[in-house]
Amino acid sequence: MINIHPGGFQLQFFSGIFLFVPLLHNNHNLLKSLYMKRILLVAVVAALLGCNKDDDDNSNNLNSTDTDFTMKATMGNTAEISAGQMASLKATAANVKAFGQMMVSDHGTAKTELHNIASDLNLYSPDSLDAQHVALAAQLSTLTGRAFDSVYIHSQVNDHLQTISLFQNEINSGMNSRLKNYANDQMPHLQLHLQNAQAIAAAY
């Protein structure tokens, strides 16, 4: 604090502000008023900083990438669960059957988590298959034995390549922090699924 005494007044520099304060050493009410104003100023600045912090929170902000991701990722989870249930019942090879069971478990958990986020954000998350997977389900229903195992596991390689691309796009271009975090968290699982599917598919 810098004190200057120009003609009966004290010029004080406090927190970047110059204040003229009369030199009335016994005027306690005046001093109290000035300090209360300083406290009020500090409170206003703190409130403004709090508002800026809220503006930086993207947990409710959305863009077109977020909405497209939510719809496609939800349908993808539904497709993996549906095909996995079929594989766990119809697959001949033990590793194909086990892979199908893993898809039901992992994508079931992922679907529930994404549905909860979508519900909070009022986003469309359909519990249905797209045309591509409706056709795949129809094809798988007609197959048995090694033919079933081959078509199923190769479709899983293709599905997970597409899904990883979808999730990476959300990570790179999405706006909503909850959806981006979801995509980041799921990415290691998707990459593991792809590696397992490729390893099994190599035998077909």
Image (cartoon, rainbow, N blue to C red):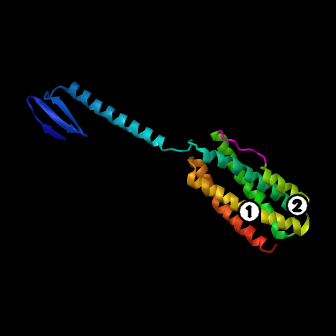
The image quadrant that residue 141 belongs to is bottom right
Left or right of 139 in this view: 34: left
Left or right of 126 in this view: 90: right
Q: Which residue is drawn at 45% across and 42% down?
A: 53
User: Is most of the magenta stretch helix, strand or loop?
Assistant: loop
Of mark 2 and mark 1, the one earlier in the sequence is 2
Percent x, y of residue 88: 84, 61
Left or right of 27 in this view: 146: right
Q: Which residue is drawn at 61% across and 57% down?
A: 168
Q: Is residue 35 above or below residue 125?
A: above
| SS type, badge 2 | helix
Residue 123 part of the magenta segment:
yes
Q: In this view, does 30 lie above or below 64?
A: above
Q: What residue type is labelled 2?
A: Leu
Quarter of the image with the N terminus is: top left
How would you rate the neighbour count of disc 1 (Cα within 10 Å): few for under 14, some for 14-19, many for 20 or more? few
The image's mark for residue 181 is none
Quarter of the image with the C terminus is: bottom right
Decide which of 4, 33 is in the foreground and name it: 4
Which residue is farthest left?
7
Q: Which amino acid does label 1 sit on?
A: Asn
The image's mark for residue 158 is 1
- Give the residues drawn in magenta, as a range: 122-128
Left or right of 44 in this view: 4: left
Residue 15 part of the magenta segment:
no
Percent x, y of residue 182: 62, 52
How would you rate the neighbour count of disc 2 (Cα within 10 Å): few for under 14, some for 14-19, many for 20 or more? few
| SS type, badge 1 | helix
Percent x, y of residue 38: 28, 33
Percent x, y of residue 158: 74, 62
Label 2, on which residue?
89
Q: Residue at x 47, y 41 (%)?
A: 55
